[in-house]
Structures are given as C-alpha cells and as structure tokens.
Image: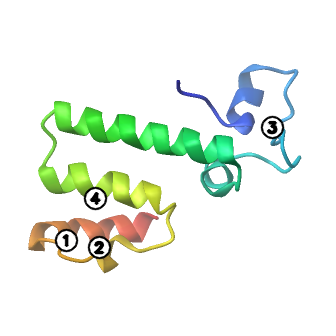
C-alpha cells in the first residue's frame, strides 16, 4: 500500500499539519526514509520489494533492477559510484546519479 508523507498529505488535507505522528517533526521523503520506526522500516522494505518486482516484470536492465533497490535500501548513505562490481555503463550512470542525490 502506497502512502504519502505527512508534508504531502497536508497539501490536500487541511486537517493535517505535515508533522510525523511519532515524533512531531516535519515529515518529508528524506526523513521518512531514515526514521527509526519498525513500521516505517517495514513499509520501506515492502516498497523496495514491490519496485524490484516491477523492474523485473517490466524488463528493466538487470543492473538497474539490482542497483536501484539496493540504493534505496541504503537510504542514501552510500554513493552509487562506490558500489562494487559496476559495469562501465553503470559507472557512468552512477556518476550522474551522485550529482543529483
């Protein structure tokens, strides 16, 4: 089940304040991905699994099918270019991704 961040939900639901129900801080995508909550961690894992399956079923390049979910699982704690065993094509993609992340 997909869910929006509280910040996004507050845009269309004026009864929401955009804050995390657990800690009261502003809840955006970055915070949601690193929030130390068992439920949120499980949600992230489930969403990454769904993405991995979708990539596979839609014939994404095998390296993208592997590395995109891996990057998301690591919550931006590693640069893509630092991942081991990247092909030359993936190294080029990694450099570009690291520029925007």
The disc label shown at residue 67, or none? 4
- Badge 2 vs badge 1, beta-carbon distance below 8 Å: yes
In percent of width and height, residue 69 lies at: 35, 51
Q: Please give the label number shown on residue 79.
A: none
Residue 92 has which mark? 1
Rounded to the nearest angstrom, the CA distance separating label 3 from label 1 is: 37 Å
Asked if marks 3 and 1 touch (Cβ < 8 Å), the reply is no
- Above or below for 10 versus 42: above
Picture quadrant where residue 8 is located: top right
* Nearer-N-terminus badge (2/3): 3
Q: Nearer the viewer, mark 4 or mark 3?
A: 4
Q: Position of residue 9 (x, y in %)?
A: 71, 28
- Find disc 2 in the rendering and name its residue: 95
Residue at label 3? 18
* SS at badge 1: helix
The answer to whether residue 89 is left or right of residue 48 is: left
Quarter-of-image position of residue 85: bottom left
Q: Are marks 4 and 2 in contact (CB under 8 Å)?
A: no
- At horizontal 24% and vertical 54% (from top left) the residue drawn is 66
69 sits left or right of 89 in the view? right
């Amino acid at each position: 089940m997909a869910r929006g961040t509280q910040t996004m939900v507050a845009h269309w639901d004026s009864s929401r304040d955009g804050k995390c129900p657990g800690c009261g801080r502003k809840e955006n995508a970055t915070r949601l991905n690193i929030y130390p909550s068992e439920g949120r961690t499980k949600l992230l894992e489930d969403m990454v699994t769904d993405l991995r399956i979708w990539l596979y079923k839609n014939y994404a390049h095998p390296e993208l099918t592997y590395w995109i979910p891996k990057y998301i699982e690591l919550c931006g704690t590693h640069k893509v270019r630092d991942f081991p065993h990247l092909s030359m094509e993936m190294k080029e993609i990694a450099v570009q991704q690291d520029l925007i992340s």
